[in-house]
Structure formats: structure tokens, C-alpha cells
């Protein structure tokens, strides 16, 4: 039914509009999830999949018949019924692939990290603006109902945020183009930025090549946010304890997000310590008040975060609305990652997060990387 043929008073909804044509470029471990979800949603259909590996293409053909398959990005650019494209290739190829798509007038959802330099991120933002195209970045946790619940607690006026920390550890999967910091920390930086509605001013980071690999497989990062709020992120590809945890410590409560704890993804400890508004005992020595209350597990809506993200992408294309995780959010995360690189090179020196970092990135194209590790 065309838009003008809708009966008066009937609001146009995704179910009564033509499904939007979507293509996915890069259909490895994560890209397959996009193909599944955009096929499941009533408001979209997967028109094309572009994947360089013939074996992976065969697997896509088996699972998703009726999808046009190609190894060439050009074939996606020239498909008029493809409006939105997901770029789910390795990080070092995000810029080149996304640039071509935006030039061809497509709306693009790029996986994290948006690019491997902030200069490239800026170029994509400019291109998207000049083509009136949606540019979104796959900061999936911003679409996680648990993280959204944490944000509600963070924003409550009672209590002040003291600090946040995150742990993202597992045994791999080890990547061949970027190190563990560029692979894993984008999630936590994006989460912190989202929770605090700001970006860090400085970072101090150390990395380690504990596996004797050619790039850092563990990292410890401190982040300084406005208002003296501290952040800390620990990432590792070499830790048998799989952790996906974010903790926010406020003056009146501690909020814990544990993505691996299904029934109790968020726990709120109504406990904290804060200075009492009285004359200090001595200079620099305040009185403190300890608050000890309940432990709460709020109900979290069980919706797949990636599905929320895909829906949001379609909605942004349909309504020309700016995504919750747009190009600028992606660029802000890349700027922090560049500062992390500089700090790691200087053995943990505290360095500012630059607005315009003209930095040559040590990450390499996956196809040129030495075969020094396996996933
Ligand atoms: N948001 C999340 O939670 C999340 C989770 C996992 C991965 N990711 C991101 O998704 C991206 C892909 O990760 P992955 O684990 O699926 O990697 P992967 O190596 O399994 O898949 C990448 C695929 O892209 C293909 N490819 C590369 N260049 C291509 C090109 N020019 N045209 C067509 N195909 C091309 C490769 O053949 C490969 O199959 C990365 O950016 C990663 O950071 C995000």
C-alpha cells in the first residue's frame, strides 16, 4: 500500500511500509548476525551480501537463500534497491569501504571502531553531511537495555559520580589488523561517553604483548572525564576469565552491569560514602557519612541489543534523524584510542585527548599483516 493510500487516521508504521533494502559488507563472525536480524525485521530485507571469502559466501547462500551474493563492493554500490549498508569488515578497511558507499549515496552503519584515524572519521562525517546520508557506528552497548538502565541511575540527581571501571577480558578472538585496545576498548569508551554525556580530556595507558605477539594483547587505560570523574578500562585477549562488566561508583550507590549475568544484568547497591557538609575537622580532612541500603536488581527488557541497533538505523534513514551513535560519537572514540596509542608509546604518560590528532596509526591492513596469531 502506498503512503498516500493509507486510510485517514492510520499512522504509517514499519509494518505497512515497503521493507527497506539493506546490504551487509563483510559477513564473518559478526556480520552474519546483521544478515539474520535484518532478515527477521519486518521493516527491512537483506538484498545483498558482499564477502571476500568464497567459503563464507557459500555459508551465507545456505543459510539465506534469495540474497544476491558478491565479492565486489562495486556491485553493492550499483544496486538501486539497497538504501542502507552495514560495513562489518576488519577495522582497517572501514574507511575505504564506507567512503565509497557514502559517495554512492548510501546510508551506512559501520562497525566499531568507526575508522583507525580521527582524520578519516572527520572525512566520513563531512561526506555523510554533504550527501544527506545517515552515518551510524555500531556502538552496540548503547543499544543494550541494561546499559540504558545504568544510565537512568547515573543521571539521577541524588549522588555524584566518583568513577567508573570496566573489564572486557577473554581468550581472544585475536585480531590481525588492530590490537586488543582498538578491538575491545571502543565498547567501554563508548559506554562511558554515553553514560556521562561527555568525552575524556586525558588518558594514561599501558599495553602488553604477553603472548609474544606483534601487537598489544592486554591493556590498562585510565581516563579523565570532565568534573574530575575517573574511568578505568582493562582489556585482554589472554585471560581465561570471560568478563563483560561495567561498574559505576557514585556517592550514594554502586551500579554494576554484568552482560554475562542474564537474570541480574544490572545490580544496584544502595551504599556509598560522601563528605558531610560541615566544618572540616582540619584542613583537607572532612567528616564522612556512610550510607548502607538495599541491593536491587531492576527488571531489564530482554531484547537483543543488535536488534535495537538495526531498528534504530532503519528509523534514522526513514526519518532523517541523527543516530544515537552517530559519526561524531565514533570519531570521539577514535580520538581517545589515538591518545591511548600515544600514551602506550610513552609508557603510560598522561596525554591529552586531542581535538585534531594528526597521528600515523600503527595498525595495519589485515591483508598485509603477518600471520602472527590465530583467532
Ligand atoms: N559490536 C560488536 O559487539 C562487535 C562484535 C564483534 C565484532 N565487531 C566488529 O565487526 C567487524 C568484523 O568483525 P568480525 O569478528 O566479524 O571479523 P571477521 O574477520 O570474522 O569478519 C570480517 C569479514 O569481512 C570480510 N571482508 C573484509 N574486507 C572485505 C571487503 N572489502 N569486502 C567484502 N568482505 C570483506 C572478510 O573476508 C571477513 O569474512 C570488526 O570491525 C569488529 O570490531 C563488533
Image: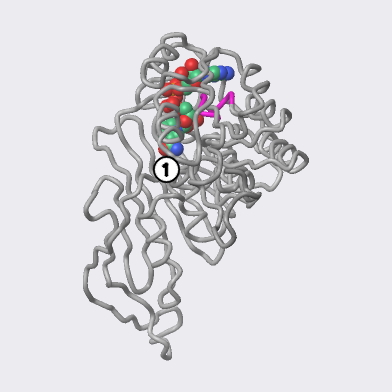
User: Is 120 part of what is drawn in magenta?
Assistant: no
Percent across and percent down for residue 247 are: 35, 56
Number of numbered discs: 1
Q: Which residue is mark 1?
A: 307
Q: Is residue 170 above or below residue 199?
A: above
Q: Residue 242 at x, y = what percent?
A: 27, 38
Q: Nearer the viewer, residue 239 or 134?
A: 134
**Residue 77 position by quadrant:** top right
Q: Give residue 124's position: percent from left, percent from top.
A: 69, 36
Question: What stretch of residues is rendered in magenta?
Answer: 87-93
Extreme residue toward the top, this view: 54
Q: Residues within 10 Å of mark 1 (few under 14, many from 20)?
A: many
Q: Is residue 49 left or right of residue 241?
A: right
Q: Position of residue 316 (x, y in %)?
A: 59, 48
Which of 293/54 is in front?
A: 54
- Give the residue at x 69% y 29%: 99
Q: Is 333 rendered above or below residue 195?
A: above
Residue 88 falls inside the magenta stretch: yes
Amino acid at each position: 500500500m502506498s503512503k498516500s493510500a493509507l486510510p485517514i487516521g492510520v499512522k504509517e508504521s514499519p509494518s505497512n511500509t515497503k521493507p527497506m533494502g539493506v546490504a551487509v559488507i563483510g559477513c564473518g563472525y559478526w556480520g552474519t548476525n546483521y544478515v539474520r536480524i535484518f532478515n527477521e525485521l519486518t521493516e527491512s530485507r537483506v538484498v545483498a551480501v558482499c564477502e571476500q571469502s568464497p567459503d563464507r559466501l557459500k555459508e551465507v547462500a545456505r543459510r539465506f537463500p534469495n540474497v544476491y551474493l558478491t565479492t565486489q563492493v562495486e556491485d553493492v554500490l550499483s544496486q538501486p534497491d539497497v538504501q542502507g549498508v552495514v560495513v562489518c569488515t576488519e577495522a582497517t578497511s572501514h574507511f575505504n569501504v564506507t567512503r565509497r558507499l557514502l559517495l554512492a549515496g548510501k546510508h551506512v552503519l559501520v562497525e566499531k571502531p568507526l575508522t583507525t584515524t580521527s582524520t578519516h572519521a572527520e572525512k566520513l562525517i563531512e561526506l555523510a553531511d554533504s550527501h544527506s546520508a545517515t552515518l551510524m557506528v555500531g556502538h552496540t552497548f548503547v543499544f543494550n537495555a541494561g546499559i540504558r538502565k545504568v544510565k537512568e541511575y547515573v543521571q539521577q540527581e541524588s549522588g555524584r559520580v566518583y568513577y567508573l571501571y570496566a573489564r572486557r577480558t577473554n581468550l581472544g578472538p585475536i585480531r590481525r589488523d588492530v590490537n586488543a585496545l582498538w578491538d575491545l576498548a571502543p565498547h567501554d569508551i563508548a559506554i562511558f561517553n554515553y553514560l556521562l554525556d561527555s568525552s575524556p580530556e586525558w588518558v594514561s595507558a599501558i599495553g602488553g604483548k604477553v603472548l609474544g605477539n606483534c601487537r598489544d594483547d592486554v591493556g590498562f587505560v585510565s581516563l579523565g572525564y570532565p568534573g574530575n570523574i575517573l574511568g578505568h578500562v582493562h582489556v585482554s585477549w589472554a585471560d581465561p576469565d570471560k568478563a563483560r562488566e561495567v561498574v559505576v561508583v557514585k556517592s550514594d550507590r554502586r551500579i554494576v552491569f554484568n552482560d554475562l549475568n542474564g537474570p541480574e544484568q544490572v545490580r544496584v547497591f544502595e551504599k556509598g560514602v560522601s563528605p558531610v557538609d560541615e566544618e572540616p575537622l582540619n584542613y583537607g580532612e572532612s567528616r564522612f557519612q556512610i550510607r548502607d541500603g538495599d541491593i536491587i536488581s531492576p527488571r531489564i527488557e530482554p531484547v537483543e541489543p543488535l536488534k535495537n541497533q538495526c531498528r534504530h538505523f532503519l528509523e534514522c534513514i526513514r526519518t532523517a534523524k541523527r543516530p544515537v551513535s552517530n559519526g561524531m560519537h565514533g570519531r570521539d572514540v577514535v580520538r581517545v584510542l589515538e591518545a591511548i596509542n600515544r600514551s602506550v608509546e610513552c609508557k603510560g604518560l598522561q596525554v591529552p585527548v586531542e581535538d585534531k590528532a594528526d597521528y600515523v596509526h600503527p595498525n595495519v591492513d589485515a591483508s598485509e599483516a603477518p600471520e602472527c596469531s590465530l583467532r
